[in-house]
Amino acid sequence: MVIKMKTIIQKIDATNMASSDFKEAAELLRNGKLVAFPTETVYGLGGNAYDSTASARIYAAKGRPSDNPLIVHISCFDEILPLVEAVPQNARVLADRFWPGPLTMILNKSDRIPKETTGGLDTVAIRMPSHPIANRLIKEAGIPIAAPSANASGRPSTTKAEHVIEDLDGRIDMIIDGGSSDIGLESTIVDLTVEPALILRPGYITIEMLREVIPDIEYDKAVLKRMRDDSIVAKAPGMKYRHYAPKGELTIFEGDTDAVSKAIGKAAEEKLRSGYSVGILTSDELAGSYEDLKKYVTEGKKPHENGALYIKDIGSRENEAEIAAGLFDALRYFDEVGAEFIYAEAFNDGGLGQAIMNRLMKAAGYHVITL
Ligand code: AMP
Ligand code: MG
C-alpha cells in the first residue's frame, strides 16, 4: 500500500512565468521526488531520469508494470548526448524538423541511464517537448526528466491538471497546473535502432510528415493490427497493455455515418430500456441523430436503474485536432458519470485519424462493429 502524502498543487501561467515559479518543483526533481507537469501532448509524471529510485517511484505511483519504459524529456538538443551511445544522422534530421514537439525517438542508451528508467531495455526513448512549462522545468531542474503519462496505469492519459489530481493526488509530490494540453494524444514514437526506422506509436506527427524526411519509414506491424492478435508482439512495451480503458464496456461502430448513428441509437435504446447507464461518444455531424433518446438524457450522475444517457460531442469529424484533443477527456467523463455501456462512432483513419483510432481501439479492446 502506498502511504498517502500531501501533493502540492502549483498553478503556473505559461504566458507569464518566472524562475521562482519553478524553484520548488526543480528542487523536488533533483531530490528524486515526483512532479507532474503539462506538455503539449498530455501531462507527464516526471522524475530524475538518472535516478533509479525516482523511476521506481514513478512505477509505484502509477501502478505501472516495471517493464514498461519511461520517456526521457530534454530541453535542448545537446542534452541528448549523455543519454545515448551515438546520435544517428536520422535523429539529427528528425530533431531539426520536429523538435521541440510531439515526437519521441528510440535510440541505443548510454550507461548513464539506469535500466529502471528504460524498463530493462538497452534502448532509451527521448523527447524534447515544446510546451513552455515543460521546457522551463527541465532547464531549471538541470537534469533529464523521465516521464510517462501522468495517469494511473490502464486509465486514459491526462490532458488537464484535474485529471492528474483524480488519479495521482496523495501519491506524488507536486502537480503543476498549466491548463489543458493542446494536442491531447501522446507523442509519435519512432524507433531509430532498426532499418528502416519504424513508427511504434502513431501521434500528432503523422507518417506522411515523417516520410518527408525519412522516406522509407514504416509502421511497426503491431500499430496496424485491427484485432487482438497475440502473434504480433508490440515493440513499444506500453502498447501491449490494456490502455485508456473506461470502466464501461466500449464498442466502436464503423461504416457509413447514417448506418452508424442508427445502429448506435438502437443499441443505446436497448440498454436504456433495461435500465443501464449509456454513454455515446459522437461528433458535431452525428450528435443530432439521437433526438429520439432525449428523454433519457441526464445531467449529473443518476442511479443506474433509471437508464440514463450521457452524450459527449467532441467536435467536428472534419477537425481531427479537435477530436484528438477531446478524446481522453470524454473517456474520463464516461467513468465519472458511471456509464456502463459506451458507444462510439469510428473516425477516419488517415493523418491524425490514425492516432485517434489507435487510442480508441485500445480503449475498446478492439471491439468494433462494422456495418
Ligand atoms: P507513456 O508516456 O505513458 O505513453 O509511456 C511511454 C511509452 O513509450 C511506453 O509505454 C512505451 O510504449 C514507449 N517506450 C518508451 N521507451 C521505449 C523503448 N526504449 N523502446 C520502445 N518503446 C519505448
Ligand atoms: Mg501512458
Image: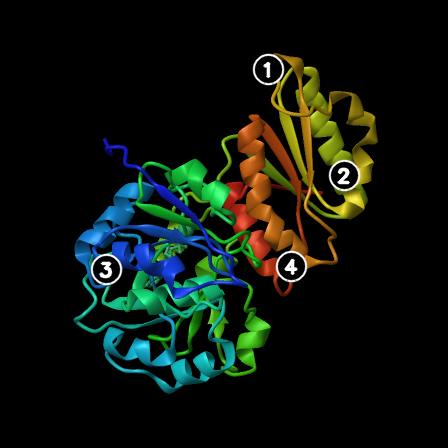
Give the mark nearer the N terminus: 2 vs 1.
2
- N-terminal of the pair, mark 2 or mark 3, is 3
Looking at numbered disc 2 in the image, what kind of residue is underneath it? Ser
Task: State the SS at label 2.
Answer: helix
Residue 72 x/y as whole percent = 33, 64
Q: Where is residue 255 in the image (x, y as percent from the top left)?
A: 72, 47
Q: Residue 261 carries which label?
A: 2
User: Which mark is first along the chain, 4 or 1?
Assistant: 1
Residue on which the image places disc 1: 303
Q: Tell me the CA gap for discs 1 and 3.
A: 47 Å
Q: Which amino acid does label 1 sit on?
A: Pro
> Image quarter for residue 194?
bottom left
Q: Which comes sooner in the sequence, label 1 or label 3?
A: 3
Residue annotated with mark 4: 321
How many angstroms separate mark 1 from mark 4 (CA)?
Answer: 34 Å
Whether residues under marks 1 and 4 lie with C-beta atoms below 8 angstroms apart, the answer is: no
Quadrant containing ligand 1: bottom left
Q: Does the residue labelled 3 lie within 8 Å of ligand 1?
A: no
The residue labelled by disc 3 is 30
- Residue 287 lies in what quarter of the image? top right
